Amino acid sequence: MLGKKVEESLNEQMNRELYSAYLYMSMSSYCTSKGLKGFANWFMVQYHEEMFHAMKFYEYINLQGGRALLKAISQPPSAFESPLDMFGKTLEHEQYITKSINELMELAIAGKDHATQIFLQWYVTEQVEEESNDNEIIAQLKIINDDPQGIMLLDRELAGRITTVPTEFSKGVQAAAKGQGA
């Protein structure tokens, strides 16, 4: 059973993950409008990952006797200066999420909530990967430095990213993950 403070904090994080999905869907739409379908694909795959993250929180809260509570989602940015600007904002956002996950972990540790600590460990590991991916693309974009040919080559590379997380949750996250190997 979740303590009240942990439950509230997990709900806040679930809603942050939903905002993340919303942000990446906005970025995908922007890229599509600019003819950068590979970038659009990368951000749509990211959208699916964030929805998976949110659903993991949703299911965990409910399985632990709490209640997942959905809140209003703020409008994300819808225009960007460049691909580098988008990935800079992506990295900033992921660093914010990392900080938030770390704070949740500290709360679980302080409350000796071992189940929540174990649950959150997956997110701690995931955030290392998220920031690493963003940093890698930022480094490539800095090398490209707005060169149209470089942007198009990277666009083609990003078009190859595929969704590796479940996207259908009607039977729950665990059942979906077993069906897709996530």
Image: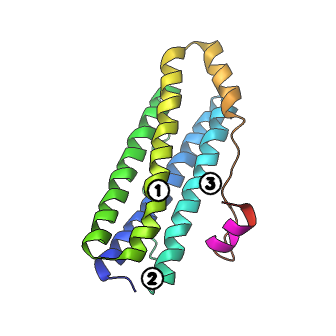
Q: CA distance from mark 2 to mark 1?
A: 19 Å
Indicate whether 101 appears above or below 137: below
> Which x, y percent locates residue 6?
33, 75
Q: CA distance from mark 3 to mark 1?
A: 12 Å
> Which x, y percent locates residue 134?
49, 36
Any magenta on residue 176? yes
Looking at the rendered structure, the secondary structure element under dot 1 is helix
Dot 3: few (<14), some (14–19), or many (≥20) neighbours within 10 Å? some
Q: CA distance from mark 3 to mark 2?
A: 23 Å
> Which x, y percent locates residue 141?
52, 22
- Label whose residue precedes the other's in the sequence (2 or 1): 1
Q: Is residue 98 left or right of residue 41?
A: left
Q: Which residue is mark 1?
A: 19
Q: Residue at x 44, y 76 (%)?
A: 69
- Specify the quadrant of the image occupied by residue 144: top right
Indicate whether 162 appears above or below 33: below
Residues at circles 3 and 1 in contact by the CB criterion of under 8 Å:
no
> Which x, y percent locates residue 12?
38, 67
The residue closer to the viewer here, 95 or 102, is 102
Q: Which residue is mark 2?
A: 67
Any magenta on residue 48? no
* Disc assigned to residue 48: 3
Per the rendered image, the range of residues in magenta is 173-178
Please identify the quadrant where the N terminus is shown.
Answer: bottom left
The residue closer to the viewer here, 162 or 22, is 162
Q: Residue at x 35, y 49 (%)?
A: 96
For badge 3, the amino acid type reads: His
- Total labels: the figure holds 3
For badge 1, the amino acid type reads: Tyr
